[in-house]
Image (spheres, grey):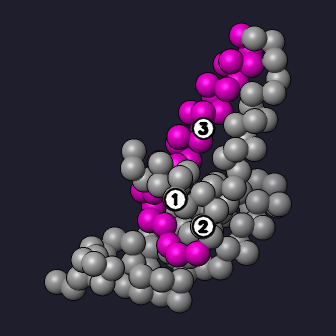
Amino acid sequence: MDLIIGCIKPKYATFSGRARRKEFWLFYLAWLIFIVIACGIDLVMGFVGIVGIVNAALVCPYFAVSARRLHDTNRKAWWLLMNLIPVIGWIWLIVLFCFKGMEGENRFGSDPLTPEKDGVPVTR
């Protein structure tokens, strides 16, 4: 739960750094749940605006966590433009999001799975 809230509160529009797979997929799952609930509310109330409001509120953190996820695999966030290519681009992005992150530090920052003590990575 902390990973999901972390994507929404302190990292709302943070496009730098790295995000591990768990952080990305938990945020994506929470986003889907919010959309399904919003669709249900829209259907019950006969209103069409709730889904748009939820999407508008969560589009920035979605792109931010997606960019950080790509950074974890040592790719630039420009790969998100693959979303513009129907079906093939979407499938390719899902594959990229599923890749294991690069171990150790890369050009986008330190490994999110490395434990830190006082901001310094702890080596075992």
Horizontal and vertical percent position of residue 99: 49, 68
The boundaries of the magenta stretch are 16-44
Residue 10 tag number: 1
Q: Give the residue pinned by disc 3.
A: 32
**Residue in the foreground of this view, choosing between 71 and 115:** 115
Q: Is residue 72 left or right of residue 77?
A: left
Alpha carbon distance from label 1 to label 2? 8 Å
Give the structural element (helix, strand or loop) at label 2.
loop
The amino acid sitting under disc 1 is Pro
Q: Which image quarter is the C terminus in?
A: bottom left
- The nearer-to-camera label among 1 and 3 is 1
First reached walking from the N terminus: tag 2 or tag 3:
2
Main SS, magenta region, reads: helix
Question: Callout 2: 10 Å neighbours few (<14), some, many (20+)?
Answer: some
The amino acid sitting under disc 2 is Thr
Q: Give the residue pinned by disc 2.
A: 14
Alpha carbon distance from label 2 to label 3? 21 Å
